[in-house]
Image (tube, coloured by chain):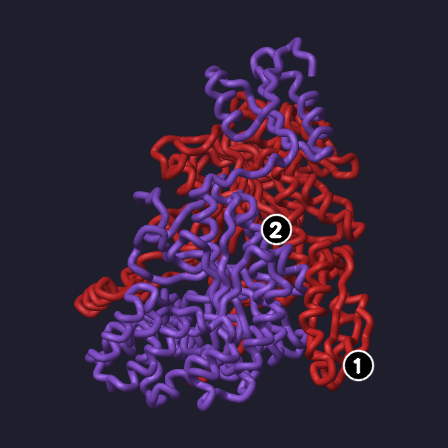
Chain colours: A purple, B red
Amino acid sequence: MKFIQTPVKGMQDFLPEDMALRQHVLGVIRETYGRFGFTEIETPVMEHIENLTGKNGGENEKLIFKVEKRGRELEKALGKIQGSGEMSADAAGTELADSALRYDLTVPLCRYYSCHKNELPTPFKALQIGNVFRADRPQKGRFRQFTQCDIDIIGDNSVMAEIELIAATSGALHRIFAEVGVSGFTVHIGDRRILRAMASSAGFAEEEYDEVFIILDKMDKIGLDGVREELLSGGYDQEKVDRYVSYFRLYQEGKAEDVASFIESTCADAIEDGAAKDMEMIMSAARAMISEDITLKFDPTLVRGMSYYTGTIFEISIDNYSFSIAGGGRYDKMVGRFCGQDAPACGFSIGFERIVTILKDLNWKEEGAGQKIAYLVDMKGAADRVTEVFGKAAAQRAEGMTVVVQPLKKNAKFQVETLEKSGYTHILKVYSDTQL
Amino acid sequence: MKFIQTPVKGMQDFLPEDMALRQHVLGVIRETYGRFGFTEIETPVMEHIENLTGKNGGENEKLIFKVEKRGRELEKALGKIQGSGEMSADAAGTELADSALRYDLTVPLCRYYSCHKNELPTPFKALQIGNVFRADRPQKGRFRQFTQCDIDIIGDNSVMAEIELIAATSGALHRIFAEVGVSGFTVHIGDRRILRAMASSAGFAEEEYDEVFIILDKMDKIGLDGVREELLSGGYDQEKVDRYVSYFRLYQEGKAEDVASFIESTCADAIEDGAAKDMEMIMSAARAMISEDITLKFDPTLVRGMSYYTGTIFEISIDNYSFSIAGGGRYDKMVGRFCGQDAPACGFSIGFERIVTILKDLNWKEEGAGQKIAYLVDMKGAADRVTEVFGKAAAQRAEGMTVVVQPLKKNAKFQVETLEKSGYTHILKVYSDTQL
């Protein structure tokens, strides 16, 4: 039997220096959200297939890793497949599986809340950190297992949820990036209700919204002119398209800074009650809470991919990087699919892997975590001093120092260099007569 | 489509109070091992099937969750199964899968080390915390996904590895359990080389060892007389059996406290060079390092299930509990199966789930992590004060306090009680005229 040394395709091993960075970032996240009253939860990485294929996951549903049935159930499934001549590979795959690996943390959160809501406070402020899995084509910076970090508030239908999420997430990112001297965050805030009202005001029919929004979502790549062209070539009426595009011109000209008047001049006739007021309240309260060097911006071009969003949507970008490092929004209808009863919900997902990648590229280094000491014992001449050395090490560890004890190797120079590379500053070779 | 609220069979959701305990224990583990120079690593939860079915996992190999191939590969596998009329369900299951979920952290560690050894220091001291998966029959206290916590030293063939592992693990457990006033640990230390020498001295043939050890391993359940009877009914020669049993009588009579004379009177003729001396050195150095209230015991009855152990084996038990809470040993031949070249290795696995269960049963409570404050804002009369309240909250959070801001609910009494239950001690209802 030949064993394979590399990780499974598209997955990663983390070296100690990678893990130090990852744990450090997670520590800041846990502490920051903790101060906002978020409490941590955990769900299994395996989830019911039914829950993962119910249109809650959008495109991710195509990337599911399915877990095989076992024993008698596997036999039955194989029999069923062989019995029916014409089952598609996809249907056979589902028949053979009884669970699958989750592709995000939102579906498990909704299941979790519906299962445990009687044991949880209202509103429930959850922090969930865990691995998710997508059978994506492997490519640079994209992996088939990666860590997500989600924070959600369930049971609060007021804008306080949005404000808390924006403040906590901005605060966590601000702390994380300050260590490498990076600033220049922009919090983009939109609202699906405003997005819909603008489409409606322009004259689009409700069944056209999804496609219109998919095209609009490309704006940062193809520009507003590109959006216009794609809408026209999609067969939409020129008058509607031009009206729609004119709204975004107002935004580009800086006319969206005053939210109320922007809405007035675009979609006041079509907007749901409360949506405009919510946005104003979020903007002003969030402004008061977040650091002055973070830009806060009402952004009517924001779409966010997932169709489950119902109200506010947000994204945080960082200067000089083309991708966002956090995103989320309100999804008031999704918990109800599990509970049978709707519960207001709003969440942020932090792009943990992206953040870690940026910090690594910027050569993040761990702050000195106390003294690091190494004893290298000559096992030929000083083996009888091992107990003494370990006693000394124990005393120093009790004081919080990091201490390693190793046999002194023949190639002592290389041994010392390796330790120095790992941050050991006090390295003592212990011979029979060495003073400890 | 109906969504399922409960977790996948045999798996668990963790409530916030569970997670607080789990994270606390992991924090102590990380800090304690950190002081011993262990560095954290991570491997993917998915592993190559070939690596998991190569007899490195013992009985656990029967409990593997296999992950299905996808797309074209799945089609090919289905074709192959349908083409061959007589493939067993088990073989078909393997044909359909291209990876599986790991059942322990040791196999991934060996793969990891063999893949990255040129980037790692020697000796390499690794801490690995992660989920493992076993399709066990669900039962009380046993789950199909659970957290393992392993520490290993690779590349140190001296007893320093054993001593460090025993000291660090005893230290971590001591700290964890001190918080709930539990002490009474016993570190049991044995050696596969002594175990084999005793079997040899008694007259057993090498090919009989495995079965003899499986029977011996039941001693804590069936007693020494039970072991004797089972060996006899297994068809082993009475003279051999009685000689073998007599060694363990010596142990029961307390004659194993002096390791050297115990070995002298049982298996001195058959023992490998160095094994006795190693044991003495481990006992004396470990004794000097660990807390005085921890018992350290040479235990020649210790077997440990996994066949990959080559030398020292150890286990930590706790008074009044029938199960061990940590176990491990030296496995010098396993890394070589991946590398092609042997590397000495020694490790401890902490029974994380058992420890957490004990602490939970003993009503572990989180130490006061600073003040917890809640503002309940009357959204009818004081909505215009939201920004002010959030500003106050931001200032208090910056000082390290935990602060939540919520809309004041109709049922304020219940809202306050819920917050008090979550540890909030300062709860202020904010009306239009409330002084902040």
Question: Which circle's residue, 2 or 1, is located before the other in the chain?
Answer: 2
Crowd class of label 1 (few under 14; some 14 to 19; many from 20; radius 10 Å): few
Q: Quadrant of the N terminus of chain A?
A: top left
Q: Split into 4 quadrants, where in the image is the C terminus of chain A? A: top right
Residue at 23% x, 81% y: name it: A84
Dot 2 falls on which chain? Answer: B
Residue B413 marker: 1
Give x and y (percent) for residue B309. Answer: 50, 38
Q: Of residues A255 and A141, which is closer to you in this image?
A: A255
Q: Can the viewer see residue A81?
A: yes
On screen, A124 above or below B302? below
Q: Is residue A106 visible?
A: no
Tell me residue B382's x, y (percent).
Answer: 73, 79
Name which residue type carries label 1.
Lys
Relative image position of residue B86 (x, y in whole percent): 23, 66
Which element type, helix, strand or loop, lies under badge 1? helix
Which residue is drawn at the image coordinates 81% and 66% (left, top)? Answer: B425
- Horizontal side of A210 relative to B295 (left or right) equals left
Residue in the image at 72% along x and 56% along y = B359
Which chain letter goes with mark 1? Answer: B
Q: Is residue B166 left or right of residue B158?
A: right
Number of residue marks: 2
Quadrant location of residue B357? bottom right
Kind of residue sitting beneath label 2: Gly
Query: What mark, if any, has residue B351 been given in the picture?
Result: 2
Give the Cα separation between the discs numbered 2 and 1: 42 Å
